[in-house]
Amino acid sequence: MNKPAQPNGQGLFQKITDSIKESLSQSIGVYASAYGEVLELLNKEFGVDAISSLCGLLLLEGLPKPDIHDVPIIKNKDFYYLIMKLSRHVTAAYGSKHDSTYTLVNEEECNEEAKGYSPEEIEIAAICSRAGIYPNMLLSLVTSPPLFVASYYLALDPSLHSLILCIRGTFSVNDIVSDMILYGSPFTYNEEEGIVHTGMYKTAQETLKYVFPSLEKARNEYPNLDLIITGHSLGGGIATLITLFLNEQKPEWNIHCYGFAPAATLSENIAMMPEVNELVTSIVFDYDVVPSLSLNSCKRLIKRMNKVLEQVGFDYVKYIAKLSQGMKTSEAARQLVEEYGKPIDDSIDVIISPQPLLPGGEVYQILRESNNMFSLQLVANNVFGEIKVSNSMIADHLPTNYIIATTKLYKQMTNEQIEEDRKKLFEQCLEMV
């Protein structure tokens, strides 16, 4: 039987993870990459043993999934179109480097088309072509901001009849931990006292100060347009807070936030306030781990891993054998749990401090269904107080998957085809910069 997770050195973690990557067959590659960042996080921030953590995660993945959802929500066509368009905006904010890194465009083709243009011109063309706008619609772009100011762009999007303030996020789970700090600070909103994420709170304050002159100028020039504040990951959490701050300053502005994969931001009492629900909509794709990441949820995850490891010995050899037979990682884990023959309890009844942080506002979760179909569910914020273990928990966070999921959901609900020629739009944007 594996011992509960105990502190261990970085050297041992590296040795174990390296040996896993080198020795396991291609069939296990999916799970190694899926859990790599989570294992590194638990080792780096909490000092837990890598191999015990891996075994605990696999057992948790094999447990029956709780049914936390009501019937699927059917929204109107405009809502599906809106989140589909905004998923492109939040991806665009990452710029040309991440665009090519995450295979959103053919890098060789774009490099060929971009010959003779400056890096700044290429960046603008990449952002605009991904967002589905033209360079003359880009009002402000900040890619190298001062300390505690997030990168962002401010743009017109006529298709949404809106001004778009798009906050850049981060891809890496570990960047989220190190950049944002997992701790909370006291926060009062509309006389309700709660907790806010310390790092995002500071960044949102400074970013709003920095962007406010551009926002006010744009609002004066385009008074009939709505203002949408959006972002992915860290950007989604910062966008949430900027929206709350700005609404207090400018209640006459028609403001709404759409956060994609928003980092856990607010204590439950503030995250679920009716006033926050009116201003903020959060979109989460399937098992995306980031909206659940807080100091509380990480501590709970470690306790859950320890609890299941105390109940059942993890047969690592049997697990590898199942994978070598072509079994999916989730199916292999589920079979191990079933073969144990007894119910496995991962519930944690003790109170863990500090309280969990959650995504704010109304939360919609896009779920994978059978036959490559998707459904949209309205879920309670506190569902994200606990990390749901899945081999897709990291992959589901990528902005590319939000583009894919929202686009398929729109097509599924409207039976309309989406015509996109990114290369052609990139060329047009280059000519216009």
Image (cartoon, rainbow, N blue to C red):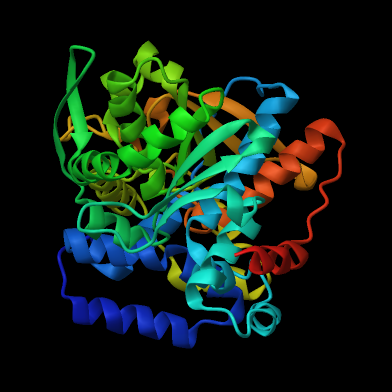
Q: Position of residue 30 (x, y in %)?
A: 56, 69
Q: Position of residue 199 (x, y in %)?
A: 20, 46
Q: Is residue 264 visible?
A: no
Q: Quadrant of the N terminus?
A: bottom left
Classify residue 55 as left or right of residue 134: left
Placement of 50 over or under 339, stated as above or below: below
Position of 300 relative to 385 (above/below): below
Residue situated furthest front in the rendering: 221
- Residue 148 lies, in percent from the top left, at 21, 52
Position of 47 with respect to 327 (left or right) is left
Q: Nearer the viewer, residue 125 or 61?
A: 125
Instruction: Work out which residue is located at the far bottom of the displayed protein and give it.
Output: 22
**Residue closest to the eye, 301 or 283:** 283
- Residue 381 versus residue 83: which sits nearer the camera? 83
Residue at position x 27%, y 43% from top?
Answer: 294
Q: Quadrant of the C terminus?
A: bottom right
Number of labels in the image equals: 0
Q: Look at 76% across and 47% down and name the residue there.
A: 372
Near-viewer residue (83 or 295): 83
**Which residue is located at x 32 percent, y 45 percent?**
293
Q: Position of residue 6 (x, y in %)?
A: 17, 62
Say which quarter of the image contains residue 85.
top right
- Occupied quadrant, residue 86: top right
Q: Is residue 24 above or below residue 336?
A: below
> From where the camera sits, is residue 334 visible?
yes
